[in-house]
Image (cartoon, rainbow, N blue to C red):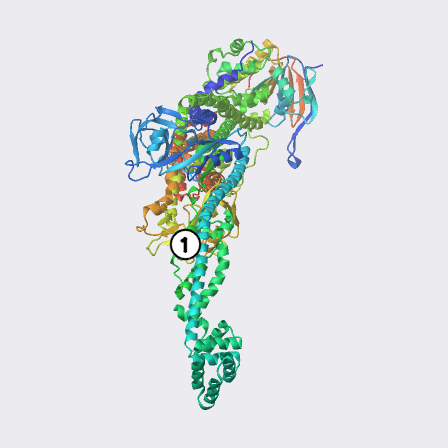
């Protein structure tokens, strides 16, 4: 039987003689690896349950919410376009009543779910009556809600029948753009159909989950499909809305056509009536004018018209009158002796003619028509009275010639206008949806000006010729009909669109678990590497101590390999044992701890512990391998030394460095300390790395509390206004003069490498008293938060995306604006109206530094108050408790490393310490000599760590927090954290130094007298 | 053919002006089972020569062969094997492993050998059987050196190399140790090469090589060996 290597017998004794060190390392490993393994097992088991949940609970591929219930045919169109199936998944956001006076607790209540996102019952029962509700387990636990409790909402009370986990809310994000979820103030719940109806429709959200007909194979595919779906959605909704609006236009057009037809007739009738009146008035005027002449005057007028003399007329008359000779003679005498009038009178007597007969005869004789005669008389009348027929007609109608003229010319124009108004013959106008503004009306689609119509009627009214009341009534009706605003209530408006892969409530848990895993494994390896170096340094010192024996063994024929293996055994066995026991504890004690951590952060479905080969591999196997690699490298290097050099005690090998020259001017103590420092450079370096690592953990554990506090103050200080009211329409007004209107819309970021963020885009009035910075036209000011988060600089361009759409906007950055509470962009109001195609009087809300009491609650869509600035801090603050773990861990690490490495320094120099004792130095002096180097190393390491940790954490912030989380928190670590870290390190070292001082005292002087280099 | 043959071995240390030639061409042969003493003052090169024969130092020139095998030709691994198979080492500083008992320290030597001697018998021979469970620091210098010799001979080596084995010991303990070495040589038949600056020890040797300044000034074969017990100085 082969003999066992007798060197193996050393192991037990080594362990015993250095029990404290090995136990410390072992316990540290057990604790550390136990926790890591526990974490990995928990992570794996919970993660498996989480991932299986996608299939088990048939988690949606995405969801879309509309402002109102979407019509079936619309859903069918989208289903066809996206090759998907919709499932009705409505919910209502209800605030808990009589629950917490200080904070609003919102519960998103769902109707029963049968097909998608099915419910996982965690405790109690699912609701079975209209008075029962099952709430999310985590929300319930965070708010002390128990099964059997009663929850009250505005429209009813429910008894809690049990706790559930909704697989689409493993992480309780109220809004997808929230930086952090809040399971304290937001929860989900499920009730029966009747229970759901009971809540009323005030807060109903018409939400539809979808599943693709063929499952997506990758996130890329999900992304592609979602992008395509968004495009199809845009088209479908546009067409759908266009149809709706067109139908409204057509309906109005139909009614308007009938009305316009009637109006046309009314106009025609009016025109006729007016014309008749004018004619009659004209005739009457003419008649009046004609009759105003005496017979003689009329005769003279006719004579002039016929261009004849009176004599010629008499002659002709007498010829026609068959007078006797006597009569003719008498007439001739009269003509010569009497006036013409008398002569005429005589002739009439003789002939028996009347004046009319005379005139008729005259017209007959002269060939003048009745009309010509009348006209001649009229002309004469007008000439004499310096007037016109129109004036006479107008006068007759009781108006002016001008008014009459204008009325008539207006009527001539009305003919064309009536053609326009004759809608019956026209197609209803086609509405251009892209140009349609939200507040536009149907009139904008027609080419009719009612002002023209009213102008005509006004002209009629001025003359008083016709009563336009009935026409006015018709025009008014038509105008009113056409002035009807587009009814947008039926338009389909997307309120929410989130494909699964972007849904934080579904995906964050999984992403967080895997990123947690990566950071934890990184932490494990850093820690193990540090421990491996601690072992390596310990072994190196042991080898130095045992150089003579090693030299003898080598000279006697022990191979390097045998010795390397020998020295490897302890570190590897201790690591393997620590890792093994740690792993066992991981599966038993620590798993529960971390499962609890997950279950207190996330609303997860039920899980089962899974054996985790990976956890074993990562913690135990790789720990041992890492320990092996680092120690093998060190030992192989160490064992390269020739046996003879070992025998001479030159364990540092041939390349032993010469002593560093130190000035004699330096105090002796310092030179001594420096020599010890140079002798222990390796230890000091590992100490530095360890302190850096422990310090990073410590600062990480401490920084968030002060950071959140500082941020709260800053965020409040930089708030634009104490109140921001978002009003429901731009007709909502306030009398408060300090309030200022603003325009606001929300766009999404689309910056590569960063998660999507919501950005508030403000349109600011010129000379704003709230945004006190000039914004150049065509450019924008970007909030400091956004500038810092994305690393923008003035002059850069930022492109933002319209939510649920492919439309993008690009802004040129003029500079930053000191605002930190969220991400925002400020642009001049004019640019805003132009860019988003808004009307001149458009606005979204008011900035105010006072509460605006004159705005009705009903008119307010949302209010942002000062305390909302720090909402994110309230959400994140729940994480701070967990951070204490890092702090405890870093203290243990400080103590362990400082202890192990300082102990090395003392042990390495035990013989010299004994010698100095013999020489008569006091214990205090000796401790000063030998503890100076580690003390200085600790202090320098602690101080040097400060800027490095600051930079490291900033890097982590920039490359992890900023890219993986939405929203913004400025990177600001309170200096106090570093002070605390340094004090903590120093305090740890003081404890270690005290122990070492004791150890130094206990080194016997006999140590120096040992002849062996052992 | 001699068991150990050293031919024209030269060795120097250092570079340039600080170069010191420690061995300037050494020739010697040692027969199997002989006790050979390398005698000389400090710096004469005797330890270097021993180390070259022991394969833990290499010669700059010349050859060393043991049982016909030229050790200068051996690579590191083979050299380790050579030492493992053929050599036992005893040093002035005992170089015991502090946390192994006397017995275990001797077992460390036995472990290296394919045909080790009986550990208990060796301890009996060396007179340390009573101390077998003690740790080195509980032993006197002589006991520690006995243990160190035990560790060297338990592997039943062909050659026992002793570098000033009594250098740190008092007169009587030194004699005890020398007696032991003599006994071991006789009992187990191993060749002993012993380095010493103690003139008296040369009398117990079969062959003596006196070195000074890196050369053998004198060598002779003891016709009349004196047993170690009778040595006086």
* Residue A923 visible: no
Is residue A957 left or right of B6 when viewed as pictured?
Answer: left
The quarter of the displayed image where residue A705 is located: top left
**Residue furthest bottom in the image:** A337
Residues A889 and A45: in front is A45
Count of numbered circles on the image: 1
Residue A978: x, y in percent?
41, 41
Question: How busy is the neighbourhood of tag 1: few (under 14 within 10 Å), some, or many (20 plus)?
Answer: some
Which quadrant of the rendered structure holds the N terminus of chain A?
top right
Q: Nearer the viewer, residue A922 or A607?
A: A607
Q: Quadrant of residue A198?
A: top left
Residue A813 in view: yes
Q: Position of residue A862 (x, y in %)?
A: 37, 45
Q: Where A599 sits versus A471, above or below?
A: above
Q: Chain of mark 1?
A: A
Dot 1 lies on which element? Answer: helix
Q: According to the image, label 1 marks what residue?
A: A474
Q: Residue at x 41, y 75 (%)?
A: A291
The residue positioned 41% from the left and 58% from the top of the image is: A767
The picture places residue A631, in percent across and down from the top left corner, at: 53, 27
Measuring 72% from the left and 14% from the top, which residue is drawn there? B1
Q: Residue A370, image x and y in percent? A: 49, 72
Q: In this rendered view, identify the residue nearer to me: A335 or A385.
A: A335
Task: From the viewer's side, name the closer residue of A823 and A647.
Answer: A823
Asked whether, in this view, residue B93 is left or right of residue A695, the answer is right
């Amino acid at each position: 039987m082969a003999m066992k290597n007798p060197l193996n017998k050393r192991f037990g004794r080594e362990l015993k003689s250095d029990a404290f060190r090995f136990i410390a390392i072992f316990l540290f490993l057990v604790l550390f690896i136990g926790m890591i393994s526990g974490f990995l097992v928990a992570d794996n088991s919970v993660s498996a349950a989480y991932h299986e949940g996608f299939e088990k609970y048939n988690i949606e591929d995405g969801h879309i919410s509309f402002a109102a219930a979407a019509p079936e045919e619309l859903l069918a169109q989208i289903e066809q376009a996206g090759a998907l199936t919709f499932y009705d998944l409505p919910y209502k956001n209800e605030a808990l009543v009589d629950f917490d006076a200080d904070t609003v607790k919102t519960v998103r209540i769902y109707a029963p779910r049968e097909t998608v996102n099915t419910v996982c019952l965690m405790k109690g029962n699912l609701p079975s009556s209209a008075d029962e509700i099952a709430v999310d387990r985590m929300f319930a636990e965070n708010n002390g809600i128990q099964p059997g409790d009663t929850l009250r909402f505005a429209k009813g009370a429910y008894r809690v029948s049990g706790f559930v986990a909704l697989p689409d809310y493993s992480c309780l994000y109220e809004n997808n753009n929230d930086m952090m979820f809040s399971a304290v103030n937001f929860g989900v719940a499920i009730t029966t159909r009747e229970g759901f109806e009971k809540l009323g429709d005030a807060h109903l959200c018409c939400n539809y989950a979808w599943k693709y007909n063929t499952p997506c194979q990758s996130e890329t595919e999900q992304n592609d499909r979602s992008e395509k779906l968004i495009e199809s959605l845009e088209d479908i909704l546009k067409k759908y809305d266009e149809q709706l609006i067109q139908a409204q236009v057509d309906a109005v057009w139909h009614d308007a056509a009938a009305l316009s037809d009637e109006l046309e007739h009314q106009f025609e009738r009016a025109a006729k009536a007016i014309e008749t009146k004018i004619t009659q008035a004209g005739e009457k005027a003419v008649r009046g004018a004609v009759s105003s002449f005496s017979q003689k005057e009329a005769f003279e007028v006719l004579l002039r018209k016929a261009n004849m003399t009176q004599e010629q007329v008499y002659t002709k008359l007498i010829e026609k009158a068959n007078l006797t000779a006597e009569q003719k003679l008498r007439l001739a005498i009269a003509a010569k002796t009497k006036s013409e009038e008398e002569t005429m009178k005589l002739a009439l007597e003789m002939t028996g003619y009347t004046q009319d007969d005379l005139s008729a005869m005259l017209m007959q004789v002269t060939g003048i028509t009745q009309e010509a005669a009348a006209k001649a008389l009229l002309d004469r009348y007008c000439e004499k009275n310096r007037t016109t027929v129109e004036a006479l007609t107008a006068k007759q109608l009781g108006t002016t010639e001008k008014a009459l003229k204008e009325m008539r010319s207006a009527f001539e124009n009305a003919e064309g206008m009536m053609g326009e108004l004759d809608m019956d013959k026209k197609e209803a106008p086609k509405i251009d949806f892209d140009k349609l503004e939200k507040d536009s009306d149907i009139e904008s689609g027609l080419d009719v000006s009612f002002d023209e119509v009213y102008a005509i009627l006004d002209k009629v009214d001025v003359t008083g010729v016709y009563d336009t009341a009935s026409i006015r009534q018709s025009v008014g009706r038509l105008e009113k009909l056409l002035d009807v605003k587009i009814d947008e209530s039926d338009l389909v408006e997307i309120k929410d669109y989130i494909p699964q892969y972007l849904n934080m409530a579904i995906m964050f848990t999984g992403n967080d678990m895997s990123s947690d895993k990566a950071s934890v494994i990184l932490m494990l390896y850093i820690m193990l590497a540090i421990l491996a170096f601690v072992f390596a340094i310990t072994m190196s010192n042991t080898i130095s101590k045992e150089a003579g024996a090693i030299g003898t063994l080598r000279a006697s024929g022990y191979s390097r390999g045998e010795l390397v293996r020998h020295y490897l055994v302890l570190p590897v066995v201790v690591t393997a044992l620590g890792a093994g026991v740690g792993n066992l504890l991981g599966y038993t004690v620590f798993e529960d701890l971390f499962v609890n951590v997950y279950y207190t952060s996330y609303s997860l479905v039920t899980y089962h512990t899974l054996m985790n080969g990976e956890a074993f591999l990562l913690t135990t196997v790789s720990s041992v391998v890492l320990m092996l690699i680092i120690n093998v490298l060190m030992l192989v290097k160490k064992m390269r030394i020739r046996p003879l050099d070992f025998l001479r005690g030159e364990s540092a090998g041939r390349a032993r460095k010469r002593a560093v020259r130190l000035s004699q001017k330096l105090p002796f103590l310092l030179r001594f300390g420096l020599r010890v420092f140079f002798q222990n450079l390796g230890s000091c370096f590992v100490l530095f790395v360890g302190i850096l690592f422990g310090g990073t953990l410590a600062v990480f554990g401490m920084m968030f509390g002060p950071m959140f506090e500082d941020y709260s103050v800053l965020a409040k200080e930089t708030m634009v206004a104490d109140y921001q009211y978002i009003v429901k329409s731009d007709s909502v007004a306030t009398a408060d003069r300090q309030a200022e209107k603003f325009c606001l819309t929300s766009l999404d970021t689309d910056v590569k490498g960063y998660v999507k963020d919501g950005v508030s885009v403000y349109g600011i009035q010129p000379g704003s008293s709230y945004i006190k910075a000039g914004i150049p036209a065509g450019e924008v000011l970007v909030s400091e938060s956004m500038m810092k988060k994305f690393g923008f600089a003035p002059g850069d361009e930022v492109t933002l995306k319209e939510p649920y759409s492919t439309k993008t906007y690009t802004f040129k950055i003029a500079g930053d604006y000191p605002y930190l509470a969220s991400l925002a962009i400020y642009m001049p109001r004019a640019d805003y109206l132009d860019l988003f195609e808004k009307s001149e009087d458009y606005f979204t809300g008011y900035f105010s530094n006072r509460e605006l009491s004159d705005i009705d609650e009903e008119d307010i869509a949302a209010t942002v108050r000062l305390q909302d600035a720090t909402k994110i801090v309230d959400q994140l603050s729940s994480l701070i408790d967990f951070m204490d773990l890092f702090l405890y861990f870093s203290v243990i690490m400080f103590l362990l490393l400082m202890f192990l490495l300082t102990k090395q320094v003392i042990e390495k120099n035990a013989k010299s310490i004994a010698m100095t004792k013999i020489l008569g130095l006091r214990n205090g002096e000796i401790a000063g000599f030998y503890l100076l180097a580690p003390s200085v190393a600790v202090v320098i390491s602690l101080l040097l760590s400060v800027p490095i940790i600051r930079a490291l954490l900033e890097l982590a912030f920039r490359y992890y927090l900023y890219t993986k989380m939405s929203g913004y928190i400025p990177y600001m670590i309170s200096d106090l954290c570093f002070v605390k870290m340094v004090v903590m390190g120093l305090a740890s070292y003081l404890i270690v130094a005290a122990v070492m001082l004791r150890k130094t005292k206990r080194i016997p002087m006999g140590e120096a007298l040992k002849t062996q280099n052992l | 053919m001699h068991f150990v043959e050293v031919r024209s071995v030269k060795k120097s240390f250092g570079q340039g002006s600080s170069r010191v030639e420690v061995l300037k061409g050494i020739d010697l042969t040692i027969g199997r089972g002989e006790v050979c003493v390398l005698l000389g003052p400090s710096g004469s090169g005797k330890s270097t020569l021993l180390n070259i024969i022991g394969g833990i130092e290499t010669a700059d020139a010349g050859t060393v062969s043991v049982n016909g095998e030229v050790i200068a030709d051996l690579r590191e691994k083979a050299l380790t094997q050579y030492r493992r198979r053929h050599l036992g080492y005893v040093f002035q500083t005992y170089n015991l492993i502090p946390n192994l008992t006397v017995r275990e320290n001797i077992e460390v030597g036995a472990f290296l050998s394919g045909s080790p001697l009986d550990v208990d018998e060796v301890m009996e021979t060396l007179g340390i059987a009573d101390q077998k469970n003690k740790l080195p620091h509980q032993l006197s210098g002589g006991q520690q050196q006995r243990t160190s010799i035990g560790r060297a001979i338990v592997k039943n080596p062909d050659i026992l190399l002793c570098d000033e084995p009594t250098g740190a010991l008092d007169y009587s303990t030194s004699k005890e140790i020398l007696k032991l070495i003599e006994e071991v040589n006789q009992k187990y038949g191993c060749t002993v090469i012993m380095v010493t600056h103690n003139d008296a020890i040369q009398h117990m040797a079969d062959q003596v090589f006196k070195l000074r300044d890196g050369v053998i000034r004198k060598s002779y074969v003891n016709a009349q060996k004196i047993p170690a017990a009778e040595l006086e100085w």
